[in-house]
Image (cartoon, rainbow, N blue to C red):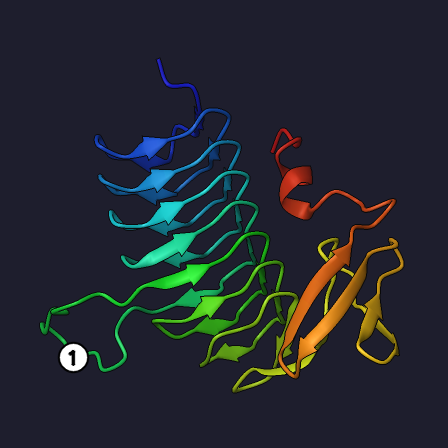
Amino acid sequence: MACFFQHPMAVVESGAVVGEGTRIWAFAHVLSGAVIGRDCNICDHTFIEGQVRIGDRVTIKCGVYLWDGLILEDDVFIGPAAVFTNDLRPRSRKPLKEIPQTRLQQGCTVGANSTTLPGITIGRWAMVAAGAVVTRNVPDFALVRGAPARLVGWVCRCGEKLSHVGGNEWRCACGAVYQQVAPGALREIQPGHARPETRAQMAGKLVV
């Protein structure tokens, strides 16, 4: 007996691996070979190809298609209609000789209607704004927006924008402290004392 929820109008092909507590909603299609972790929320009208790997507590909103080469680590959030590609120079009836790997690292957020080109890494707890076009790697904790997406600030694990308090130090209202170690690199040096749950963790508690 399946240990995950599958809506009657969803298709999960034999050979797909789905973790305990995951919910797969109407008109989703998961191909054989795909691996989905525990406590994920796969919303309506989504498609997951057979070589996709998804970690635990991942939220995938409506209208998202995940193609071979995509790896989603734990706690990733993908907004509605976000687009991913796996071929830089596509032609009809010309199969890929090698599929580039696109990695979404732990806790990152990919905003609604954004586009991420193949071979990109989006860093830990980074945030891609709605409508952005991601053409290069995104650092940990970075906030990027625009077309092409550019670094415009830094965000905390909790999702709030960080404030620059002088020198190399950045702080969040939750109490977390970060240090800028290079022009495009930030590291957490003190966790927040009252950090709210991530949206992915909150989604894991919802019935729908």
Nearer to me, 161 or 43: 161
Q: Is residue 173 above or below residue 38?
A: below
Residue drawn at x 43%, y 67% is 83
**Residue 143 on image: x %, y %:** 66, 73
Q: Is residue 186 above or below residue 157?
A: below
Residue drawn at x 70%, y 46% is 198
**Quadrant of residue 178 in the image?**
bottom right
**Quadrant of residue 125 in the image?**
bottom right
Nearer to me, 85 or 27: 85
The quarter of the picture where the N terminus appears is: top left
Q: Is residue 1 above or below residue 30?
A: above
Q: How many marks?
A: 1
**Residue 64 on image: x %, y %:** 44, 57
38 left or right, relative to 164? left
Q: Is residue 91 above or below residue 67?
A: below
**Residue 123 on image: x %, y %:** 54, 64
Residue drawn at x 59%, y 52% is 107
The quarter of the picture where the C terminus appears is: top right
126 left or right, relative to 32? right
**Residue 146 on image: x %, y %:** 60, 84
Residue position marked by numbered label 1 in the rendering: 91
Nearer to me, 108 or 114: 108
- Mark 1 lies on a secondary structure that is loop
Identity, as a three-letter code, of the amino acid under mark 1:
Arg
The crowding category of the residue bearing disc 1, from other C-alpha atoms within 10 Å (few below 14, some 14 to 19, many at least 20), is few
162 left or right, relative to 89? right
Residue drawn at x 11%, y 69% is 97
